[in-house]
Amino acid sequence: MSKSAPKRRMITSALPYANGPIHLGHIAGAYLPADIHVRHLRSTGEDVLWICGSDEHGAAITLRAKKEGIPPREIVDLYHEEMQKAFTGLDISFDHYSRTSSPKHHQVAQEFFLNLMEKGGFEVKTEEQFFDEKAQQFLADRYIQGTCPSCGHDGAYGDQCEKCGKTLSPTELVNPKSTLSGSTPVLKPTTLWYLPMGRHESWLREYIVEGKLDGQPHHDPKTWKAHVLGQCRSWIEGGLESRAMTRDLDWGVPVPVEGAEGKVLYVWLDAPIGYITATMEWCEAHGQDWKDWWQDPNAELLHFIGKDNIVFHCIIFPILLKEHGGYNLPTNVPANEFMNLEGDKISTSRNWAVWVTEYLEDFPEGSDAMRYVLTAIMPEQKDSEFTWSDFRDKVNNELADVLGNFVNRVLVLTKKYYGGEVPTAPAQEDLTDTDRALLEALAAAPGKIGGLIQRHRYKEAQLEAMNVARLGNKYLTEQEPWKLQKTDPERTATIMHLTCQVVGNCAVLLEPFLPQTAAKLAAAFGLTDGRWADAQPDMVQAGTTLGELPILFAKIDDDTVAAQVAKLGQKGGDTTREIMPAKDEITFDDFTKLDLRVGTVLECEKVPKADKLLKLTVDTGLDTRTVVSGIAEHFKPEDVVGRQVTLLVNLAPRKLRGIESQGMVLMASTDDGGLRFVSPEEGVQPGDVIS
RNA sequence: GGCGGGGUAGCUCAGCUGGUUAGAGCGCAGGAUUCAUAAUCCUGAGGUCGGGGGUUCGAGCCCCCCCCCCGCUACCA
């Protein structure tokens, strides 16, 4: 460690994008680990502030609003509320949950932007860009298609013609079209503010690789996860390109510069600043100075995120913070990997996901159970997998049997023998070696578990916390108080007194993982405000009357598992399909220019050094020709051979990876990015004309 | 194809800068036990650590080649 313990800990979790509900993958990635971390810090009395909020800007929300014909506000309001419900339901205990569409945030983000601008942190460039008057917005290069000036190909993109390979700018296209509305865009000059990241390579390298900032030790890179470091190194060594930090959109934080109407900050610039805004809001409400959290060198900054956000939090945001000046940079970014679901990737569009609010409807008391399972399989260093049968096993065999049953045993025995009062503590000299071993283990547990949590080893930490309950089970079984009760009441009292201590310790040590269960245990064992330091071998007072405790964890049966699995992949009411808008009208003559034929695939092989390309040899009736098609991710060569396909035969030839492609195979693309052949029914032959 | 991260017991995962018989939880088998939510406790069987070379007294950990999975990226209208 290069620095002494920080005075304050500023903790953030990735701002969820207000364009859809929260699923288990989100929780396991950026929220549950942070919640465990923060709960532990609070329990140890550390000065910690954990903020989050909805990320409500960006093109995706705008596009969706346009498609649904509603204002973006409606979408973000809906999901802002939905996401808060999900977090609250799983006891994700943010100190403050904000949102980026608030006036306060706009002001903060604008001030931040102006500061960078005044420092010369941006490169300002004016460029002519296409504007879609129908969609009322400027178009990114890839949203424009047209005819290639060099080869005449009709489907060239604004950045490149896929046919002849020529690099283009949108303005070179003949007959450009917006892929948003199909209309013809017009050219308008626009100004963009670029962040020249290349300037920052040298200090970034030192910061990431050596953990040094301005020549001073800042953090220990060895405490960072391998995949986080790897990804960052990869980006830095690959050379950092300038990135546009503004967009021409009407939804977002307006660029606070005269003449910049219709421009907003790039969502990735404004979102992380949302962390700062949220902190300010909390501080205003609590009479604190936000700078103590973000600018005091004695404060530590920690970002919890999923692996898709690494570059932004480890590279771009640090650049912004450093360029602005005065801010702390993160001392760690413990990004998690992804969580898969029942053998497949989580997919919103295929509804292959477990939505938190739906889960809570099906399992109203299920917060702790889900937290436990998600922690047990947390993707800390590699992708992991959630299955409902595993959920059942862990809830039934670990939570219910090991923990729940242990607590129940203690409760029942204490009631039976002592009318529910914790018996008197034994004298030191009466303790057996086994007793001492138990007490030693109890004394060691808080430090061990806390240490694991602080090193972001939540999975192992939870296991150790559960081991305390296991210890209790073992002790009870070995000591057999039910046999001693009649012959040796004193010994029985000792055993039961110690066992009660074990439960008391569980109440504190499990709190970061299972807050509801911990609260129930604490209440039943007469503990109030259990802090980490209270986890002691003598924490439960003799004479305490134990309260009633319902069954802690209901067992999950196979039918429940089956029902949950069956829900996966079914289209819910919430999935809005993204339908491509109709293109401009064409004449019949235009259509007749296309020569579409039936073809039969004779041979097929993978194109080397290209992941997506297959080389097909097709009998077109006219001839046998080679067609290169980007379908290798969806079809194996042997699946394609022998198929009848629809072929555009008069498409100008184009070289792909050195192979000349003479035509195009027509494919239908599905919602989830899949492809299907557009194949004729039976009874047709190669060369048959399609019209 | 390039870059990054992974491939370790049936399942989900640990294995720090290379060092005695490779670990945990669950599952499985056998046994013990009954206070308890048919719970608990003990014992045990399971691994050529993706494959093949190499460095080393010694490699799951280091080097080279290959295969597979995930992410970014390129090629794909």
Image (spheres, coloured by chain):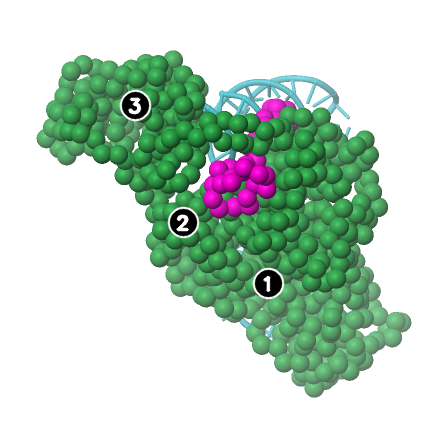
Chain colours: A green, B cyan
| Residue A544 as seen in the image, left or right of residue A24 | right
- What whole-number distance in Å separates the C-alpha atoms at marks 3 and 2? 30 Å
Q: Residue at x 66, y 49 (%)?
A: A276
The subunit carrying tag 3 is: A
Q: Disc 1 designates what residue?
A: A91
Same chain letter for marks 3 and 1: yes
The subunit carrying tag 1 is: A
- Badge 1 amino acid: Asp
- What whole-number distance in Å separates the C-alpha atoms at marks 1 and 2? 31 Å
Q: Quadrant of residue A170?
A: top left
Vertical position of residue A182 compared to residue A448: above or below: above
Q: Secondary structure at mark 1?
A: loop
| Residue A326 as seen in the image, left or right of residue A392 | right
- Badge 3 amino acid: Asp
Q: Disc 3 designates what residue?
A: A154
Q: Disc 2 designates what residue?
A: A65
Report the mark closest to the observer, 1 or 2: 2
Q: Position of residue A512 (x, y in %)?
A: 67, 60
Q: Magenta part of the protein: which range? A: A236-263
